[in-house]
Amino acid sequence: MRFQTDLIPATLIRRYKRFLADCLLEDGREITAHVANPGSMLGLKDEGLRIWLEPNDDPKKKLKFAWRLVEHEGGHFTGVDTGVPNRMLKAALMAGDVPGLDGYAMVRPEVKYGENSRIDFLLSDDARPDAYVEVKSVTLSRTNGLAEFPDSVTARGTKHLNELANMAQAGHRAVMLYLVQRTDCTSVSLASDIDPTYANACAEARAKGVEILCFDCRISPAGVTLGNPLPFEA
């Protein structure tokens, strides 16, 4: 998935009100950018970080910049737009490019199921059970090389695990897919100290048949594409 316009570098001044960030451009201008991320962004919102913004000239948009990436030492990047995983994965799933989830005849996003929920992707094929795939964007890393989810308490995430467990027990395939939007991590784990309820729900869901898949991303100011499978450390 390529960004619609070329990204430009900036320095983060502050992130506030969840969806806003004040930034300093290299030409000295101070601007406000949209932040497509309602989460805590733990470790990704410190003043002085080098970030990358996507400019736009859409007259319908009040803010003319959107925050897309954080740049780390060693040329590594983290993607902060939580809308990227599903957009990128939809194309990859339809092309059969997601190991373990390939070969399905139909890929449908945002299908209603369970108790007032929507699954990110429902994969269907006459030759096998439906696959219910929930996707989570992972951006937290507190230990070198280790990506963690979640970065804050997520009652919604716990609900999704319970819904997946119900699908698995009903005879469907149920998959929790953790997409690591970082280029500096080689494994994935749960931040059980941040949300022990979620960690317990994940263990229970796995015991009921929910599968865990993890992938990293290839990220640069040009765009984001699906990377390689990563091990999950329970």
Image: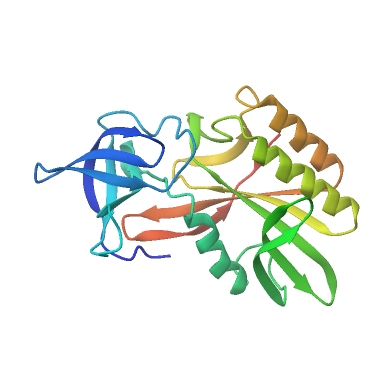
Name the residue located 25 percent from the left edge and 43 percent from the top edge.
Answer: 32
Q: How many marks?
A: 0
Question: Considering the image in quadrants, where does the C terminus appear?
Answer: top right
In the depicted structure, whether residue 60 falls above or below residue 96: above
Question: Considering the image in quadrants, where does the N terminus appear?
Answer: bottom left
- What percent of the width, then of the height, locates residue 143? 50, 27
Q: Left of 50 or right of it: where is 149?
A: right
Q: Left of 61 or right of it: where is 199?
A: right
Q: Left of 182 or right of it: where is 62?
A: left
Name the residue located 90 percent from the left edge and 51 percent from the top edge.
Answer: 169
- What percent of the width, then of the height, locates residue 160? 71, 45
- What percent of the width, then of the height, locates residue 131? 76, 62
Q: Residue furthest top?
A: 193
Quadrant in which residue 186 is drawn: top right
Closest to the observer, 69 or 152: 152
Name the residue located 37 percent from the left edge and 60 percent from the top edge.
Answer: 223
Colour convention:
rainbow
Closest to the observer, 52 or 29: 29
Name the residue located 80 percent from the left edge and 41 percent from the top edge.
Answer: 205
Quadrant in which residue 150 is drawn: top right
- What percent of the width, then of the height, locates residue 44? 39, 34
In the depicted structure, whether residue 68 falls above or below residue 132: above
Q: Residue furthest left?
A: 27
Q: Left of 205 or right of it: where is 147?
A: left
